[in-house]
């Protein structure tokens, strides 16, 4: 979520400190969902702080992973990198909790039940939001694809 290793490390440290401070109140079977929820909220707070500090001259994209494929097919590597950039931008345009649901399900592989517990949402809401988010991503990425080749 943060796309910054140093900020991610800071948030991770803070989250585990909170876990340590609250260890006596934790039920073992709920630790994972608690960690995910606290980490997600801490990341959102960090992103909000970062946006407040941004200035107009800092419009450039920062922290974007660049595909470093030194394999035999540079055209394919460039195409993959371009798609990853567009997907990342499309994900950024999704509002919360849609973005978090997509990331938890499609990227991190969590089950619907785990997502519902982590985000404190009803299971059916998670399913509906995921469906809507996928549809928005398909539309967004489809428009980009059509625009490039039109």
Image (cartoon, helix red, strand yellow):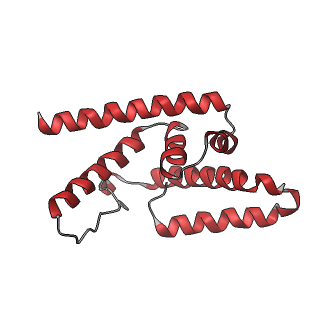
List x then y, in percent, for residue 32.
70, 55
In the picture provided, is 63 more to the left or to the right than 75? right
Which residue shows up at 48% across the image and 30% down it? 131
Q: Work out whether 105 lies above or below 80.
A: above
List x then y, in percent, for residue 46.
55, 55
Q: Please tell me in which quadrant of the rendered image residue 24 appears.
A: bottom right
Which residue shows up at 83% across the image and 56% down it? 26
In the picture provided, is 107 more to the left or to the right than 81? right
List x then y, in percent, for residue 130.
51, 34
Which quarter of the rendering shows the C terminus? top left
What is the total number of numbered labels drawn onto the structure image? 0
* 110 or 101, nearer to the observer: 110
List x then y, in percent, for residue 63.
38, 62
Which residue shows up at 37% across the image and 54% down it? 55
* 120 or 92, nearer to the observer: 120
Q: Work out whether 85 lies above or below 94.
A: below
Residue furthest to the front in view is: 72
Residue furthest to the right in view is: 24
* 9 or 137, nearer to the observer: 137
Q: Please tell me in which quadrant of the rendered image residue 16 appears.
A: bottom right
Residue furthest to the bottom in view is: 70
In the picture provided, is 69 more to the left or to the right than 128? left
């Amino acid at each position: 979520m943060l796309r910054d290793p140093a900020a991610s490390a800071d948030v991770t440290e803070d989250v585990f400190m909170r876990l340590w401070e609250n260890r006596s109140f934790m039920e073992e079977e709920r630790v994972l969902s608690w960690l995910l929820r606290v980490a997600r909220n801490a990341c959102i707070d960090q992103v909000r702080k970062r946006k407040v500090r941004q200035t107009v001259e800092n419009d450039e994209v920062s922290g974007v992973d660049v595909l470093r494929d030194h394999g035999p097919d540079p055209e394919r590597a460039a195409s993959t990198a371009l798609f990853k950039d567009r997907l990342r931008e499309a994900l950024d345009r999704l509002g919360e909790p849609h973005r978090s649901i997509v990331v938890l399900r499609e990227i991190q592989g969590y089950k619907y039940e785990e997502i519902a517990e982590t985000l404190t949402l009803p299971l059916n809401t998670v399913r509906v939001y995921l469906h809507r988010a996928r549809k928005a991503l398909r539309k967004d990425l489809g428009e980009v694809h059509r625009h490039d080749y039109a």
